[in-house]
Image (tube, rainbow, N blue to C red):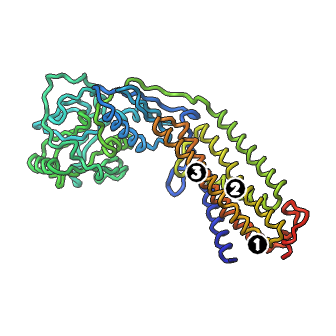
């Protein structure tokens, strides 16, 4: 028994040390992972984008488009984002704390269709809008500036850079239609991988690897083997990305698209990796949203949390004495672990999310109250301290289990409701409350129990005053 308690204590100390290190990690980095605190749109502001479909679509198609955009948002690393349908042909996207709103907008609206086209030996300027046999009438596309880019078509030969493009007019219906060598639907999304800063030919370039399957892979290999030293244009969403010279056959239909900036590479990666949109969208409006609550609300919430923890700790110390002290230590550990998990997942803190965390503090103490009340009853009935501790936990466990289960069910319903209707504030509250309930089970059942077991052999633990009792016959046994 003693060895198990020591082992549990060592485990608790390790968890506490790791949690504190994450909470106060230098540079907000832990094992190469960004663990900075993330705030929601209500506390730090962000970007709100309204996307409108260029053609009428049914509800199912719009739901599919919404799912693709949600995956792209996740690929951008944006937490607590809101993606919801608005009317029959619009999608609202809210991105808290986005550093480059314009880049995020382009990632969201692009359809993610990658094609290689045969220009019959003609070089096309990057950024030129073209019609292809795969998509001859791209309704939503107007030419936009495209980053300077190249394509690696042979690992032993440096690619030919293209010039920085300039805006070009909207598509002319009389423009030629270029034959596509590959079809976007044959792109193997599993093969789309970032090569940030590791291009085989240019050490300072960023790249995205790709591979086609089926007939597209065969056509690409055949075309490149028959057109050495001739241009082949790469088209993304009907916009020419670059026109590199073929240096060698692309065996297996695989290669790389390289850019001069990481942001451009990440945009292309997200568009290709997380699926093609079934519809073309135009940006109807894009605006920066200021924080609706701001830093004052964060500061007030932090003060409320500190005051709440302090009052709860004083109550436990005055009413339960020594067990209350152990519960306070467990509560501090609970707070440290909670913030560490919020930073690791990461959980974006909205004001309702902070409220959910503060509420979970009370729930964490509630389990200890049940346990200590049972502990007193057992001591009054003449049980020894060791037996009273064990039976106190055993008798209180059904009530702790049932109350925690009911709160978890409520949190799950709130989370599903908020996720279905795009209400991020409800999601944040439900998530922090649910995590708090699970962590409170760990701190109450494992931490507090271990600390109580370790104090049993101490002489001070045999004093009835330590339990706010005048006498306890079983303490000296």
On the image, the x and y values in percent for residue 23 come to 62, 52
Would you name the residue on which mark 1 appears?
A: 386
Furthest residue toward left: 226
Q: Name the secondary structure under disc 1.
A: helix
Residue ID at (74%, 58%): 327
474 on left or right of 292 = right
Q: Name the secondary structure under disc 2.
A: helix
* Disc with the residue nearer the chain's start (3 vs 1): 1
Q: Of 44 and 360, which appears nearest the observer?
A: 360
Would you name the residue on which mark 3 appears?
A: 435
Q: Residues within 10 Å of mark 3 (few under 14, many from 20)?
A: some
Q: Residues within 10 Å of mark 2 (few under 14, many from 20)?
A: many
Q: Of 228 and 9, which appears nearest the observer?
A: 9
Would you name the residue on which mark 2 appears?
A: 367
Residue 9 is at least partly visible in this image: yes
436 on left or right of 219 = right
On the image, the x and y values in percent for residue 402 come to 62, 55
* Disc with the residue nearer the chain's start (2 vs 3): 2
On the image, the x and y values in percent for residue 31 come to 51, 58
Q: Name the secondary structure under disc 3.
A: helix
205 on left or right of 391 = left
On the image, the x and y values in percent for residue 310 come to 77, 48
Residue ID at (68%, 63%): 447
């Amino acid at each position: 028994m003693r060895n198990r308690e020591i082992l549990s204590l060592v485990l608790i100390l390790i968890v506490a040390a790791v949690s504190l290190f994450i909470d106060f990690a230098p540079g907000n980095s832990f094992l190469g992972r960004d663990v900075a605190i993330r705030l929601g749109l209500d506390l730090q502001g962000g970007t709100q984008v309204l996307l409108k479909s260029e053609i009428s679509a049914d509800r199912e198609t719009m739901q599919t488009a919404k799912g693709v955009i949600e995956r792209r948002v996740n690929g951008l690393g944006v937490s607590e984002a809101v993606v919801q349908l608005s009317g029959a042909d619009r999608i609202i996207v809210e991105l808290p704390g986005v550093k480059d709103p314009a880049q995020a907008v382009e990632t969201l609206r692009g359809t993610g269709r990658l094609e290689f086209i045969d220009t019959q030996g003609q070089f096309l300027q990057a950024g030129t809008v073209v019609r292809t046999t795969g998509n001859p009438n791209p309704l939503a596309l107007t030419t936009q500036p495209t980053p300077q880019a190249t394509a690696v078509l042979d690992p032993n030969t440096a690619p030919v850079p293209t010039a920085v493009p300039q805006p070009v007019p909207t598509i002319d219906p009389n423009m030629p239609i270029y034959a596509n060598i590959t079809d976007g639907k044959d792109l193997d999304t599993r093969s789309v991988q970032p090569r940030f800063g590791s291009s085989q030919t240019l050490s300072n370039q960023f790249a995205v690897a790709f591979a086609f399957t089926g007939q597209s892979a065969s056509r690409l290999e055949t075309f490149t083997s028959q057109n050495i030293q001739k241009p082949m244009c790469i088209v993304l969403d009907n916009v020419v990305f670059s026109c590199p010279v073929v240096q060698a056959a692309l065996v297996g239909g695989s290669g790389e698209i390289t850019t001069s900036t990481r942001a451009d590479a990440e945009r292309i990666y997200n568009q290709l990796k997380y699926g093609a949109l079934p519809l073309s969208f135009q940006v109807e409006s894009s605006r920066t949203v200021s924080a609706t609550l701001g830093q004052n609300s964060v500061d007030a919430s932090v003060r409320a949390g500190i005051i709440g923890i302090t009052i709860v700790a004083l109550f436990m110390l005055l009413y339960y004495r020594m067990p209350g002290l152990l519960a306070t230590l467990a509560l501090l550990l609970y707070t440290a672990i909670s913030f560490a998990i919020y930073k690791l997942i990461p959980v974006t803190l909205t004001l309702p999310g902070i409220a959910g965390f503060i509420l979970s503090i009370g729930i964490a103490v509630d389990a200890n109250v049940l346990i200590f009340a049972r502990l007193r009853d057992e001591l009054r009935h003449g049980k020894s301290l060791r037996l009273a501790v064990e039976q106190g936990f055993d008798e209180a466990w059904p009530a702790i289990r049932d109350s925690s289960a009911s709160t978890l069910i409520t949190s799950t319903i709130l989370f599903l409701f908020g996720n279905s209707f795009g209400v991020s504030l409800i999601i944040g509250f439900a998530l922090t409350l649910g995590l708090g309930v699970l962590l409170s089970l760990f701190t109450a059942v494992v931490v507090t129990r271990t600390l109580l077991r370790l104090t049993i052999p101490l002489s001070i633990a045999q004093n009835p005053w330590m339990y706010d009792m005048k006498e306890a016959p079983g303490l000296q046994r």
